[in-house]
Amino acid sequence: MESLDDAGVYKLTDDLAIIQTVDFFTPIVDNPYDFGQIAAANALSDVYAMGGKPLTAMNIVCFPAKKLDISVLKDILKGGIDKMMEAGVTLVGGHSIDDAELKYGLSVTGVVDPRNMVTNAGAKAGDKLILTKPLGTGIIGTALKAGKASKELVVRVTKYMTTLNKKASVLMREVGVHACTDITGFGFLGHACQLAENSGVGIKVNSTSVPVFPEVEDFIKRALIPGGLNRNREFYSKNIKFSKQVPDYLRDVLFDPQTSGGLLISITPDKAALLLDKLKKAVIPEAAIVGEIVSKHAGKIIVD
């Protein structure tokens, strides 16, 4: 709890602990089945970020029964179940209420060996930072709601949001890493700040190396920005220093709240290239080294 880590961990024995997390939200895409998949993948991600294995899940459903046909709920739940099956997770129940606004997500329980658990507090000076998915889903979601995002773009971004972080988690454990967090609601810089502060280190980000959906630059220029982006900027800006050459649109993207984003992994330089190669071979082509851990300015982020 003290480090605002991705999930709660309760130690049962010397070699076994349970991981618990919960997440749910309103639809960010129009297709109910896709929404169910995205919500499930997002909830499962917290367990993967800590190097754990999700085992069971419970549905959380808020459904406006008088406004929407029950077929919509069936499609959402089908998407969630299919994603859980892909993850090897068993649905063991859940809870639903009649609500004016549609929401869906999961409460997830997993397991981890506490001796090998990955947290957001273990980064060490000299480490490289690897990001496994491109940024910009929050901005694109806002463009979708405004009717400005093309069908092709929605399909492409949905593919990333429905992709589990399972493979990336397995590979990082195989190689061995110092720290990890997943990039979700606090945006890239918000979660990077938490990693830096909890590890007692600073971070240098190479902004030109950060993978970004190319369409977001145009959306930002058209003021299609989610409210969460500005809230992230207001809260974390005191810990961020941008170099003059970083364009304004990219500064916005780095604060953009992500849904089912990638993992941000802190790893020694000698292992970084190996992990990056494994990630790319595992069909995670956008994975990139985006920065490094430094001993100076603990808790602060320098973006070049």
Image: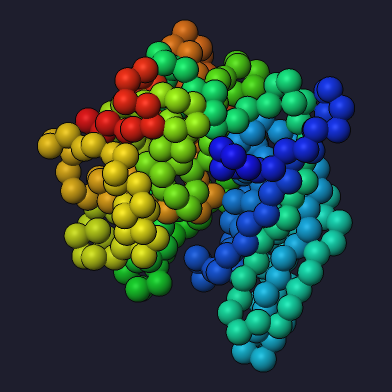
Residue 257 percent across, percent down from the top left: 42, 53
- Toward the viewer: 283 or 97? 97
Residue 278 percent across, percent down from the top left: 54, 21
- Above or below 170: residue 62: below
- The answer to whether any part of residue 251 appears in the image is yes
Relative horizontal placement of residue 125, taking residue 20 as reference (left or right): left
Residue 116 percent across, percent down from the top left: 70, 21
Residue 63 percent across, percent down from the top left: 67, 78
Task: Pick out the residue farthest to the left.
Answer: 244
At horizontal 69% and vertical 49% (from top left) the residue drawn is 21
Relative horizontal placement of residue 224, taking residue 76 as reference (left or right): left
At horizontal 37% and vertical 41% (from top left) the residue drawn is 189
Task: Pick out the residue farthest to the bottom.
Answer: 66
- Toward the viewer: 95 or 231? 231
Q: Quadrant of the C terminus?
A: top left
- The answer to whether any part of residue 140 appears in the image is no
